Amino acid sequence: MARNTQVAADHDAPPITQILARFVATHPARGWSDAVEHEAQRTFLNWVGCATGAATHEAMQAALAGVSMLQPAPQATILGRAEKVDMAGAALLNGISSHTFDFDDTHLKTIIHPAGPVASAALALAEHLGASGRALIDAMVLGIDVACRMGNVMYPEHYDRGWHITGSTGMLGAAAACARLLGLDEQRTAMALGIAASQPVGLREQFGTMTKPFHPGAAARAGLLSALLARHGFTASARALEAPRGFAQVVSTKCAWHEATDELGQRFEISFNTYKPFACGIVIHPSIDACVQLREQGVKADDVERIELKVHSLVLELTGKKEPADGLAAKFSVYHGCAAGLLFGRAGEPEYADAIVTRADVVALRRKVVASVDDAIDEASADVTAVLRDGRRIHVFVEHAIGSLQRPMSDAALQAKFTTQAEPVLGAARTAALIAGCRRLGAMADVRELAALARP
Amino acid sequence: MARNTQVAADHDAPPITQILARFVATHPARGWSDAVEHEAQRTFLNWVGCATGAATHEAMQAALAGVSMLQPAPQATILGRAEKVDMAGAALLNGISSHTFDFDDTHLKTIIHPAGPVASAALALAEHLGASGRALIDAMVLGIDVACRMGNVMYPEHYDRGWHITGSTGMLGAAAACARLLGLDEQRTAMALGIAASQPVGLREQFGTMTKPFHPGAAARAGLLSALLARHGFTASARALEAPRGFAQVVSTKCAWHEATDELGQRFEISFNTYKPFACGIVIHPSIDACVQLREQGVKADDVERIELKVHSLVLELTGKKEPADGLAAKFSVYHGCAAGLLFGRAGEPEYADAIVTRADVVALRRKVVASVDDAIDEASADVTAVLRDGRRIHVFVEHAIGSLQRPMSDAALQAKFTTQAEPVLGAARTAALIAGCRRLGAMADVRELAALARP
């Protein structure tokens, strides 16, 4: 029996579904500054590297085996693999792989990882259509803008409630990007956003399982399908995002509508995208960064008596695992992070291999890390002192870690990260070619050229 | 930056993901009474009829055109159509068609339409696997139990918040049914439920658009994919349904856990399934029923001076459209419903054709309906008096409409409803054969036999 219930209607909600649809459908190609365009290239490069690097992970094997039961047509590339699948499957699989190592991009304002859902859908569709690189970049920038702006509308309440915001806004970004690639008009773009709005993906309870990276993949797939349906006249509410029983009000009590529209077409959310230098949760990054700096100042593990680490309480709450038994557990250990930083000068996926995490010198060094809480120190900072056997104290304070908005990774560092990830899968020559391909994507006549470079 | 936020943990939540997974994986085939089995047959028959009847609707044309862009393998039947698509596409499309006319089954305790998501996924997979009819019915009964029990856990708060509960629980039922058909063990069934838990589908804002029927279809597709992934070892949280940041607590503040487990394996929610005799919102049904009864008592439209209708305020609030301009609008007009009941003795999809809604005698009769509110009358009831030109007053009070749990449609009436829907698509002979096929489904060695009967 239908019920007579009250919903707190927000009559002040502007028509953001229509406003965002018009923006996606009509904003000029490359209608932004060189800085935005450069950040788009960095986002794409980082995403391709992450996806390629995890191409043969067991999560990918399982997902590909499942998708293969649908006997998909070979429409689109799975980055780092020889098999092709249909567009929906490629969107899913590339979304999964790009987030498998938690090493992808982060829109820090919302902790959305925007490339996963958006680029995964856009590349799959662009490859099948034979679209230009220019069209692909445009779709990605606009799609990321839609997803992150909707994140801004709802963050943090939506995330606090338990939604994995990457997947629960990503389907909108994917739909927007695919609508753009399909050349849908404003009205059909609104329908694509509307259909996608009914399909938020992702629960935080899934963190630590394969379903976490499934979220951006499933969001990519949902957004792509939404655009395909809208392309053929399928309808949805033209107020699906903002209506009282529409998306934002159903999944969030915070609905800061102005975030969807402020400086639309002038400020691009991809400008605030960041890339992780270290393959672990972002709260550990300042501590690792500090230890890398200690190493650069000549501190050697053998000389260390102890490492005094002062951090915000949140850091130990989330990543206080003292004796991680394997690589997965080590991702939640600031102690391992510090040891890796000091011993290796980096903490990429190889430094989280089980064999490294259990290696005697690594174990010995991380036991020398003495962590204490100081809530006067920001969550984004770390205060580290190496106390040497000879009594010397070497102090490093990191206010903002490398990879933050304040201290972004350099292009060279991003390329090095890419290489570390892609080389084991593609080999050195193909990896270099793929990097070059990503760099000239904007001038590429057909993205199938790029996709081909990503197959071993 | 990760945030340090509090979530109201419910430490009393039993491990319902695991409990439901064990139930789905281990409950004996046809492990229920004859009454439950009979209701399962009725549910399946009604679902096939609804899906077949809407097979060529414009929503289906648009959705099929979109799905066809994926160049799907011909794995499974679209009921009422000659084309085949892959399992995921068939699950989506049959889910859409079965809900297109809002004429499908209703689990009244939660207003879930359970067959849409569950049967659509199960038939597509069963057909591709060449499973037996017995296995298909078992999967459907168990899947519907999971979806409706999770609905019981959260209803009404979850629905009131704006979720279209059919799609936002249906992916769990679909995953359960598909896990059962794939023969997954308890552990992998739990993973299937867990993956599905991250993909609730459906906003009430979409009502009145094609995205409403998209919800059961997308839920079917999501649940099917979840089972395929779990089959190959993809992992999810084993507490995905009940954890503090798991499904139920993220999408509902009401979490009556006992509803998931009370009398599990003894009480089957499919027992509480009902079927609509009239192709419109259920609040109109008592009024139509009363007018059909007036007709059966000899009241003729020409003799009517006016029809006095007394109903609960909710009825006019939801369906008070006095002058509907077309068939879609007429679905929200208790006035049109009354006119159809008195003129035709029924209100199926044909009585909601635009040409009928605008026909002079129909318009004239519905203008004679004078509705008034009486909140002493239950939402499920209607008080109708025909005042004739000769001054006579014929009174009918309907406490429970035909199609309710208290006055279920007879098997013969269900068959007649099926015929009305399927004959225009399949013709009389094929329709009769399909009905016979549905009736002997439990003894059918391979459901492909049934699927073949549903293609024109």
Image (cartoon, coloured by chain):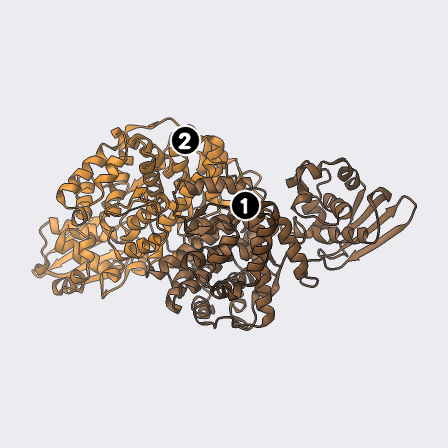
Chain colours: A orange, B brown
The circle on residue B55 is 1
x and y percentages locating residue A206 in the rendered image: 37, 58
Q: Which structural element holds mark 1?
A: loop
Nearer to the camera, A229 or B413: B413
- Chain letter of mark 1 equals B
Identify the amino acid type marked 2.
Answer: Gly
Whether A21 is drawn above or below B224: the answer is: above
x and y percentages locating residue A271 in the rendered image: 32, 36
Q: Which structural element holds mark 2?
A: loop
Tag 2 near tag 1, CB within 8 Å: no
- Residue A263 visible in rendering: no
Whether A260 is drawn above or below B263: the answer is: above
- Chain letter of mark 2 equals A
Question: Can you name the residue that lies furthest to the right here?
Answer: B390
Identify the amino acid type marked 1.
Answer: Ala
Quadrant in the rendering for residue B192: bottom left
Residue beneath the point at 47% across and 49% down = B92
Report whether A339 appears left or right of A71: left
Task: Identify the image quadrant of the N terminus of chain A.
Answer: bottom right
Q: Which residue is mark 2?
A: A183
